[in-house]
Amino acid sequence: MRRREFLQGSVLGGLAATRSVRAAEEQALPAFELEEATVSDLQEKMASGELTSRKVTELYLARIEALDKKGPALRSILETNPDALAIAGALDRERREKGPRGPLHGIPVLLKDNIDTADRMTTTAGSLALEGSRPGQDSFVAKKLRDAGAVLLAKTNLSEWANIRSSQSSSGWSGRGGQCKNPYVLDRNPCGSSSGSGAATSANLGALSIGTETDGSIVCPSNANGLVGLKPTVGLVSRAGIIPIAHSQDTAGPMTRTVRDATILLGALTGIDPRDPATAASEGKSHTDYTRFLDADGLRGMRLGVLRKLFGFSEKVDKVLDAALDAMTRAGAVLVDPVEFPSKERVDESEIEVLLFELKADLNAYLAGLGAKAPVKTLADVIEFNEKNRDREMPYFGQDLFLKAEEKGPLTSPSYLEALAKNHRVTRVEGIDAVMNEHRLDALLAPTGGPAWVTDPINGDHYVGGSSSAAAAGYPNVTVPAGFVSGLPIGISFFGRAWSEPTLIKIAFAFEQSTLYRRAPRFLPSASI
């Protein structure tokens, strides 16, 4: 969950450190056999017998030990699955006897630590208040991954409580995990709230990862960590068994190093789930195989609206994005530049109103569902725990948003219903839908964000600029690496109408294939200018 919607709308806020910093030598790290390996690469090696799922899992576990616990000490992983090797071995036997279940068979996947797994890993949202909590059943996401044959490798660090606790937080910090680092430049922030998923996947600590987003929490860490992030339409992926912020905007989604891998992962996650009524709307609109929409020539003839109002926060970022626009034009896209829709400032107050109302209701429902063994049973209990454990839980920032949420009434309150209606009217009917109809667009585009800022736990986040404009609408957004500023990744976002994932995937893949900007991080101590 991003704080920009609370503080300064779609513009991400204050300027990151601008002083020049001489580039330091990258840390000497051993070569990694699976560096930048895709799902297809791993499947080919497992099919040939060159690798097994158990060996792949061993290699990633060793990588986590070398880079997350030691060396750069990314602090992107909260815990590894003690049964991962046994699961991988069983999947190897199944492959030999029956063949693979599908493209995720034997593939290690990282899960954000707000996604329930009914195993020996805990699910805590990074909070010490839920330390030791083991849900009684898998989330829908975890179950779908297990059914697909994936190895649930580890739980990733995150901005605690998905960054909804405080308006002055440091993204990537949690009571359980401490401060997660950006693998490109270690003193820089990985953004949040899916910080660990972003940093770990970029650093090749796992093949794939799952993040969650309420407003920016998939796309911002994907931008900061040089990844493809795919935030689906709300309702495409079930939220059952995911520690919530707000049901009107929450969703889980893929965070990967390539568009193809994101589509493979997305296809495994879809489906109607009785535990999440929002998924009923996906009937006839979802797919179990999104790879069929991959088209290297997919930009040809696409009409893309350029949201110029979301540019201009950085000349360096504008230069990167303008080069990306030129690449799209060469690939046959038709750019409608500029287009505008109502400013997000129009829904700033109504969005926070909705999120705080839904946080209280949804989190209380989740905690109640944990049963008698739940360490805390209500939002009020969490607030009390934090107060009693200020030295461990609030050494840098407090819980002002939790306190405001606790003051809210039921979801029948007129102020909540009015705010929710306004959000949807302004962002959907008068926003994305209106501008796409007016200009006959296939998608909209904008910079996903600026370069990662220097982590500052005392003053909190220092955002540079960008957009998560599809979030309040509940619409899909795909971010793809678009270049670098001083060695720090910059992403471009493609977003559009509800259920338009196939079109966005087609556009994102064609852009990726025509540019191939992604490159692995080098774990530099500080940035160069």
Image (cartoon, rainbow, N blue to C red):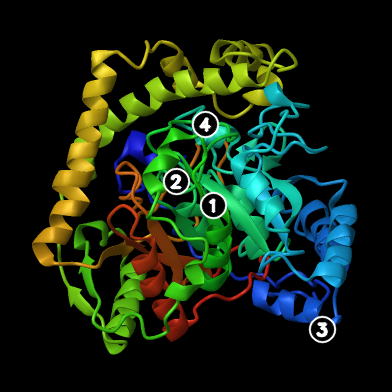
Instruction: Using the numbered discs, state the Cα–Cα distance from disc 1 to disc 4 in whole angstroms.
Output: 28 Å
Q: Residues within 10 Å of mark 4 (few under 14, many from 20)?
A: many
Of mark 1 and mark 3, the one earlier in the sequence is 3
Check disc 1 and report the residue beneath it: 454
* Front-lying residue, 311 or 198: 198
Cβ–Cβ below 8 Å for labels 3 and 2? no
Q: Are marks 2 and 4 in contact (CB under 8 Å)?
A: no
Q: Mark 2 and mark 4: span between their CA atoms?
A: 25 Å
Answer with mark 1 or mark 4, whichever residue precedes in sequence: 4
Q: Position of residue 409 (x, y in %)?
A: 37, 10
Mark sitting on residue 95: none
Image coordinates of residue 433 in percent, x first then y, are: 19, 53
Marks 1 and 2 close (CB-CB < 8 Å): yes
Instruction: Evaluate if marks 1 and 4 touch, with contact meaning CB atoms under 8 Å apart.
Output: no
In the displayed orientation, state which residue is furthest to the left: 438
Dot 2 crowding, Cα within 10 Å, few <14, some 14–19, many 20+: many
Residue that badge 3 annotates? 48
The residue at the far front in this view is 98
Residue 307, by quadrant, is bottom left
Q: Is residue 312 visible?
A: yes
Going from the N terminus, do you reach mark 2 or mark 4 first?
4
What's the residue type where badge 3 is placed? Answer: Ser
Amino acid found under the numbered disc labelled 1: Val
Q: Amino acid at mark 4?
A: Pro
Instruction: Look at 86% across and 66% down and name the residue there.
Output: 92
Query: How far is mark 1 from mark 3, CA to CA?
Result: 44 Å
Residue 10 as seen in the image, left or right of residue 506: left
Ranked by sequence position, the earlier of labels 3 and 2 is 3
Residue 182 in percent (x, y) is at 61, 57
Along the viewing direction, whichever of 344 and 87 lies nearer the viewer: 87
Q: Give the class, few, some or many, for how many residues have Cα within 10 Å of label 3's Cα (few <14, many ≥20).
A: few
Label 1 or label 3, whichever lies nearer to me, is: 3
